[in-house]
């Protein structure tokens, strides 16, 4: 029984690594576009929040949480790209700065969501 469990675990982890490796090769720019779309959507939801009715605020917060829950795994993958994926250190440094800026923007969205949730 334990051998079957371990075999299944190995197969699943191998499939996950293969999928992740494929995603790293094809998805970097797609991830950035997706993250920008999510960021814009959350920003729009936050912009008019104070003028909403209590029920609309509840729906708005639910939408913000749902969008962030979709964005965070993509963000995690996007910021974890290793140095080896870049042809030189200058490009890697530029990428780090860009990823840090995007991470900071998401931190600001999360902070604002926290403030809005407390209202």
Image (cartoon, rainbow, N blue to C red):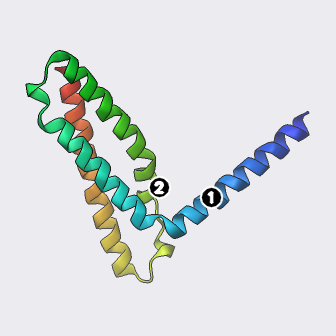
Residue at (23, 49) in percent of width and height? 40
| Residue 66 locus on image (x, y percent) | 37, 34
Report how far apart the C-alphas of labels 1 and 2 lie in the structure: 12 Å
- Mark 1 is surrounded, within 10 Å at the Cα level, by few (under 14), some (14 to 19) or many (20 or more) other residues, namely few
Choose between 97 and 17: the one closer to the eye: 17
Q: Residue furthest bottom?
A: 88
Q: Which mark is residue 2?
A: none
| Residue 52 locus on image (x, y percent) | 13, 24
In what element is the residue under mark 2?
helix
**In front: mark 1 or mark 2?**
1
Q: Is residue 63 left or right of residue 10?
A: left
Q: Quarter of the image holding residue 67?
A: top left
In what element is the residue under mark 1?
helix
Above or below residue 110? Residue 87 is below
Choose between 99 and 41: the one closer to the eye: 41
Q: Which mark is residue 19?
A: 1
Closer to the N terminus: mark 1 or mark 2? 1
The mark total stands at 2
Residue at (24, 28) in percent of width and height? 60
Residue at (40, 38) in percent of width and height? 69
Q: Quarter of the image holding residue 47?
A: top left
Q: Quadrant of the N terminus?
A: top right
Write down the residue under mark 2. 77
Q: Quadrant of the C terminus?
A: top left
Above or below residue 19? Residue 50 is above
Residue at (42, 58) in percent of width and height? 78
Above or below residue 98? Residue 52 is above
Tag 1–tag 2 contact (CB < 8 Å): no
């Amino acid at each position: 029984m334990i051998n079957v469990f371990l075999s299944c675990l190995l197969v699943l982890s191998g499939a996950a690594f293969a999928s992740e490796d494929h995603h790293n090769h094809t998805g970097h720019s797609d991830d950035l576009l997706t993250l920008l779309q999510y960021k814009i959507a959350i920003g729009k939801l936050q912009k008019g929040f104070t003028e909403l009715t209590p029920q609309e605020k509840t729906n708005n917060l639910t939408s913000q949480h749902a969008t962030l829950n979709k964005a965070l795994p993509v963000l995690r993958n996007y910021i974890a790209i290793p140095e080896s994926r870049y042809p030189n250190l200058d490009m890697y440094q530029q990428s780090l700065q860009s990823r840090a800026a995007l991470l900071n923007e998401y931190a600001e969205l999360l902070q604002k969501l926290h403030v809005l949730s407390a209202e």
